[in-house]
Image (tube, rainbow, N blue to C red):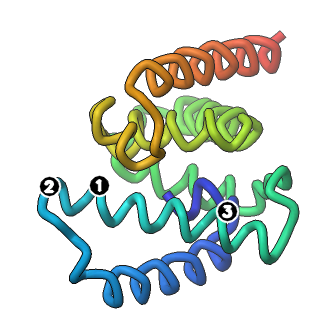
């Protein structure tokens, strides 16, 4: 989550370290529920605080898009041909760039749902918005993503 919000692995490492310190200090405030969602909320809040302090939050870095695409494609079975491998890498890079270009609120909602696998209720808790807003942001993020990928192919 930190990597997706920050757009940079080195910034994400700083954010996660700070989030872990905050979680450690605030463990007494944890009142049960989903510990993963609680931690993700801390990471999210830390990321936005860190980004506000260190750079313009509208800035999107895609410095690691090739590396991130390579990490994600390791889970895919080896392609049958070099051409298939090349197409998969190009598609992964295109998707990574399209996700990185989404506005932060849409990007975080999409990543929480599609990458992290949280349900709508947990996303609402993490982001502090009602489930209807989560659903709306997710629909808009998906629509923008499809438009960006479609425009990129033409």
Specify the quadrant of the image occupied by residue 90.
top right
Residue at screen point 55% across, 34% down: 88
Residue 54 vertical position relative to residue 3 in the rendered view, above or below: below
Residue 134: where, in percent of width, then height?
A: 46, 27
Instruction: Report the residue marked by disc 1.
Output: 37
Q: Nearer the viewer, residue 42 or 147?
A: 42
Q: Secondary structure at mark 2?
A: loop
The answer to whether marks 2 and 1 mark residues whose Cβ atoms lie closer than 8 Å is: yes
Instruction: Give me the C-alpha separation between circle 1 and circle 3.
Output: 19 Å
- Count neighbours of disc 2 (C-alpha within 10 A) and say few if under 14, some if 14 to 19, many if 20 or more: few
Residue at screen point 87% across, 61% down: 56
Counting residues from the start of the chain, the first of labels 1 and 3 encountered is 3
Residue 1 vertical position relative to residue 123 in the rendered view, above or below: below
Q: Which mark is residue 131?
A: none
Task: Decide if residue 10 is in sight here.
Answer: yes
Residue 40: where, in percent of width, then height?
A: 38, 60
Residue at screen point 34% across, 48% down: 75
Residue 121 vertical position relative to residue 18 in the rendered view, above or below: above
Q: Which mark is residue 6?
A: 3
């Amino acid at each position: 989550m930190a990597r997706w919000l920050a757009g940079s692995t080195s910034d994400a490492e700083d954010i996660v370290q700070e989030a872990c310190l905050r979680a450690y200090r605030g463990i007494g405030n944890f009142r049960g529920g989903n510990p993963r969602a609680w931690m993700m909320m801390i990471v999210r809040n830390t990321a936005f605080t860190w980004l506000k302090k260190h750079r313009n939050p509208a800035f999107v870095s895609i410095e690691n898009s090739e590396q991130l695409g390579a990490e994600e494609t390791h889970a895919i079975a080896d392609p049958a041909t070099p051409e298939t491998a090349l197409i998969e890498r190009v598609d992964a890079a295109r998707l990574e760039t399209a996700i990185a270009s989404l506005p932060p609120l849409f990007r975080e909602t999409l990543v929480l749902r599609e990458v992290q696998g949280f349900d709508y209720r947990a996303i609402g808790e993490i982001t502090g918005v009602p489930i209807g807003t989560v659903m709306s942001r997710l629909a808009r993020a998906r629509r923008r993503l499809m438009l960006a990928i479609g425009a990129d192919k033409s």
